[in-house]
Image (cartoon, helix red, strand yellow):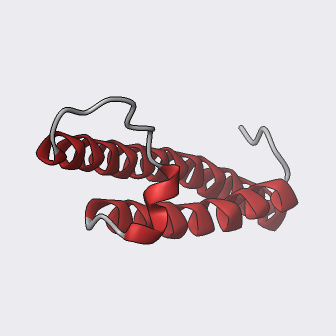
Amino acid sequence: MACCGPKLSLCGLIISAWGIVQLALMGVFYYIEAVALAEDLPEVHSYETLDDFYSQMTRGYQQNAYNCWIAALLYLITMAISAHQFWLNNRSSLSV
C-alpha cells in the first residue's frame, strides 16, 4: 500500500542518499579527530592535566562520530522506505 506519491518518494530517496554520504563522511572525520570539527565538540569545562583534556576531547570526537553514524543508519532506513514506496508507485502506474 503506497502511502506517499511518486514525487515524494523520489525526493526521500535523493535526500536520504545525500544524508548517508554526508553523515558517513562527517563520522569518519570525527573519528580521525579532524581539527576543523573541534568547534562542534561538547565543551570541556574542567580538567586537571593536559592528558585529562586530551581524553575528554577524544571522547567528544568519538561520541560525535557515533552520533553521525547512527544518523546515517536512520537515513538508510528512510531510504529503504522511500525506495519501497517508489517501487510501489511505479508498479501500480504500470499496471493501470
Q: Nearer the viewer, residue 12 or 29?
A: 29
Q: Residue at x 58, y 67 (%)?
A: 17
| Horizontal arrangement in the rendering, residue 69 relative to residue 57 (left or right) | right
Q: Residue furthest top?
A: 46
Q: Position of residue 4 (x, y in %)?
A: 81, 44
Q: Nearer the viewer, residue 81 or 58?
A: 58
Q: Quadrant of residue 86?
A: bottom right
Q: Is residue 3 visible?
A: yes
| Horizontal arrangement in the rendering, residue 13 relative to residue 68 (left or right) | right
Q: Position of residue 26 (x, y in %)?
A: 45, 64
Q: Residue at x 60, y 52 (%)?
A: 84
Q: Which part of the image, by quadrant, shows the N terminus?
A: top right
Q: Position of residue 2 (x, y in %)?
A: 75, 42
Q: Residue furthest front?
A: 48
Q: Which part of the image, by quadrant, shows the C terminus?
A: bottom right
Q: Position of residue 59 (x, y in %)?
A: 25, 42
Q: How many marks?
A: 0
Q: Is residue 7 above or below residue 44?
A: below
Q: Nearer the viewer, residue 50 or 39?
A: 50
Q: Is residue 25 visible?
A: no
Q: Is residue 69 above or below residue 14?
A: above
| Horizontal arrangement in the rendering, residue 72 relative to residue 54 (left or right) | right
Q: Residue at x 12, y 46 (%)?
A: 51
Q: Nearer the viewer, residue 32 or 5?
A: 32
Q: Residue at x 71, y 61 (%)?
A: 91
